[in-house]
Image: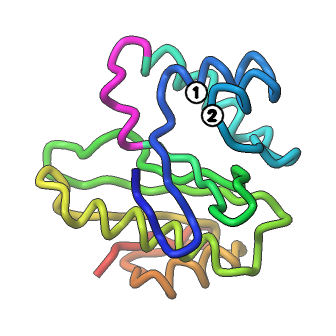
Amino acid sequence: MIETSRLLLLPYTYELVEATLKGKRDFENVLGYKVSNEWPSPQYLKLIKMKKDKLHQTPEQSIWSRIAIHKESRTLIGEIGCKGGPNEQGTVEIGYGMVSEARNKGFATEMVIGLTDWLAAHPKVKRVTAECLVTNVPSTKVLEKSGFKVINENKEMLYWEKI
C-alpha cells in the first residue's frame, strides 16, 4: 500500500478485479470500502477485463496497478498505475483516472506524486514516463505539478518524463 496525506493507493489484485467484474456490491464487500458510482469508467472497464487474465497468470504484477481510496470518505475515487512493469531499460509509463466528483481537488496530483515517489524507490525502475493528448489540459497540469517535463510532442500527443 502507498499512503499519501488523503489517499490510500492499494494494489489492484486479481481478487479485486474479479469482484469488480461481478458487480459493485461484491466489489465493495471484498474491498472493504465504498465505490463511487462513477467508477470504473467505460474505458477503464475494458482494461479491467484484460487485467483479469494477466493477473491470473502473474498475480505479482498487481503492484504496478493501484486503486485510489479517499481516506476521509472511505471511497474509491480513481485508479493509477503503470502500463505493465518496467521494461528492460527500467522504464515504466504511468496512467491514471479520477471520477468527476473528485476532480479539481488535487487528488490526481497527489496520486501521481505518491506513485512516482514509490516508483523512484523501486530498484527495477530507472525512468517514469507518461503521455496525454495535447488537448487534455487537466492531465497537463497534473503532470507539471508532479514534476514531469515534456520531452517530445506532436500535433496530438505530449510525451512526458519525471525529472
Residue carrying label 1? 16
Say which element carries label 2. Answer: helix
Q: Quadrant of residue 35?
A: top right
Is 43 part of what is drawn in magenta?
A: no
The magenta segment:
56-64
Residue 14, image x, y percentages: 49, 22
Viewer-closest of 122 and 143: 122
Say which element carries label 1. Answer: helix
Q: Marks 2 and 1: in contact by CB < 8 Å?
A: yes
Q: Amino acid at mark 1?
A: Leu
Residue 112 shown left or right of residue 32 in the figure? left
Task: State the predominant SS element of the stretch in magenta.
Answer: helix
Viewer-closest of 46 and 9: 9
User: Which residue is found at the position 49% from the left and 46% from the top?
Assistant: 10
User: Which residue is found at the position 76% from the left and 80% from the top?
Assistant: 104
Residue 72, image x, y percentages: 69, 66
